Amino acid sequence: MKNEFWDFLDQLIASSEIVVDRPKGSQHPHYPEIIYPLDYGYLAGTVSADGDGIDLWLGSQPQKTLSAILVIVDLRKRDSEIKLLLGCVPQEIQIILNFHNSGSMRATLLNRPITQSQKHEAL
């Protein structure tokens, strides 16, 4: 039961198109001083707290599986939402966490729990 949250997110990701609208190195459309350290986008056909698609970051792993999520509070925008981290290695997760813990934003990280089968595969 406790992994259903992650399973539901997996289903949402699998049934949605991943759109990268802010490639690595691009500027934020409203805040040009903000440069994206990795590919950033959203899940088409979904809705987040801001009324747009659910935001996501894409890491370097070929399999774009859900690694973690961030819960964000942005005082400038006066909102809160989640960001999906897909195919991210630990170093990329730290880069993304640092990105969201700057300026008017703060984030907390929820790592995906490792299942028993994943533990056995790693051995």
Image (cartoon, helix red, strand yellow):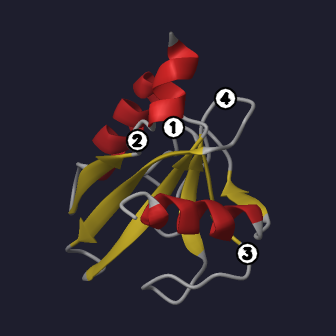
Q: Which residue corresponds to mark 3? A: 44
Three-letter amino acid code at disc 4? Gln
Mark 1–mark 2 CB contact (< 8 Å): yes
Q: Which residue corresponds to mark 4? A: 61
- Taking the spot 62% from the left edge, 47% from the top edge, the residue there is 26
* Of pointers 1 and 2, the one earlier in the residue sequence: 1
* Of pointers 4 and 1, the one earlier in the residue sequence: 1
Residue lying at the far bottom in this picture: please name it.
51
Query: How crowded is the residue under tag 1: few (<14 C-alpha within 10 Å), some, or many (20+)?
Result: some
Q: In the rendered view, would you say 102 is above or below 74?
A: above
Q: Secondary structure at mark 3?
A: loop
Q: In the rendered view, would you say 68 is above or below 44?
A: above
Mark 4–mark 1 CB contact (< 8 Å): no
In-image side of 76 versus 6 (left or right): left
Residue lying at the far top in this picture: please name it.
123
Say which of marks 1 and 3 sits in front.
Answer: 3
Q: Quadrant of the N terminus?
A: bottom left
Q: Quadrant of residue 39?
A: top right
Q: Which residue corresponds to mark 1? A: 37
In-image side of 98 versus 117 (left or right): left
Three-letter amino acid code at disc 3? Ala
Three-letter amino acid code at disc 2? Ile
